[in-house]
Image (cartoon, rainbow, N blue to C red):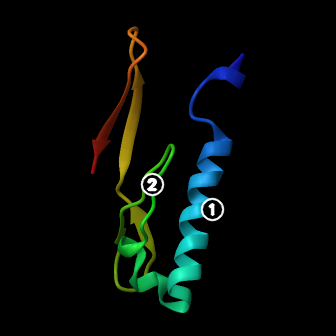
C-alpha cells in the first residue's frame, strides 16, 4: 500500500503553491529576480533556484531528506 509512504504529494503541492504564491504576492512581476528572497519554511521540499542559462529557465538545487529514527526522532538532512 503506497498510501502511507513518503513523499506525500499533498505536502509537495502545499510547499510549491505556498512558495510561489507568497513570492507572487510579495514581489509580483519581479518574482523572477527575487526567487532567493522568498522567506519560506517548507514541509517536504526546499527551493534554491539557479539559472540554467541566460535564455532559459531555472533549476532547483535544494534537496533534503527527512529521517525518522527508531527512537521516534525526526532528523532533517540538507543537501544544497
Q: Which residue is identified by label 1?
A: 17
Question: Left or right: 9 with respect to 66?
Answer: right
**Residue positioned 38% across, 15% down in the render:** 69
Residue 20 percent location from the top left of the image: 56, 69
Total number of numbered discs in the rendering: 2
Tell me the CA gap for discs 1 and 2: 13 Å
**Residue underneath mark 2:** 41
In the foreground, 51 or 12: 12
In the picture shown, does residue 28 fall above or below 66? below
User: Residue at position x 58%, y 58% from top?
Assistant: 16
Kindly identify which numbered label has been placed on residue 62.
Answer: none
Above or below 15: residue 44:
above
Q: Is residue 69 left or right of residue 30?
A: left
Badge 1 vs badge 2, beta-carbon distance below 8 Å: no
In the depicted view, which residue is nearer to us: 57 or 20?
20
Q: Nearer the viewer, mark 1 or mark 2?
A: 2
Residue drawn at x 53%, y 64% is: 19
Mark 1 crowd level (few <14, some 14–19, many ≥20, 10 Å Cα): few
Farthest residue, direction bottom: 29
Q: Quadrant of residue 75?
A: top left
Which badge, 1 or 2, is on the more N-terminal residue?
1
Q: Is residue 37 above or below residue 79?
A: below
Tell me which residue sits at (57%, 80%) in the image: 24
- What is the x, y in percent for residue 1? 72, 15
- Above/below status of 77 relative to 38: above
Residue 9, horizontal then vertical, whole percent: 65, 42
Q: Secondary structure at mark 1?
A: helix
Amino acid at each position: 500500500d503506497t498510501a502511507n509512504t513518503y513523499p506525500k504529494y499533498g505536502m509537495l503541492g502545499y510547499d510549491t503553491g505556498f512558495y510561489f504564491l507568497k513570492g507572487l504576492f510579495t514581489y509580483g512581476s519581479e518574482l523572477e529576480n527575487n526567487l532567493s528572497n522568498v522567506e519560506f519554511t517548507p514541509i517536504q521540499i526546499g527551493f534554491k533556484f539557479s539559472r540554467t542559462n541566460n535564455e532559459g529557465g531555472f533549476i532547483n538545487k535544494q534537496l533534503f531528506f527527512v529521517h525518522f529514527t527508531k527512537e521516534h526522532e525526526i532528523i532533517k538532512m540538507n543537501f544544497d
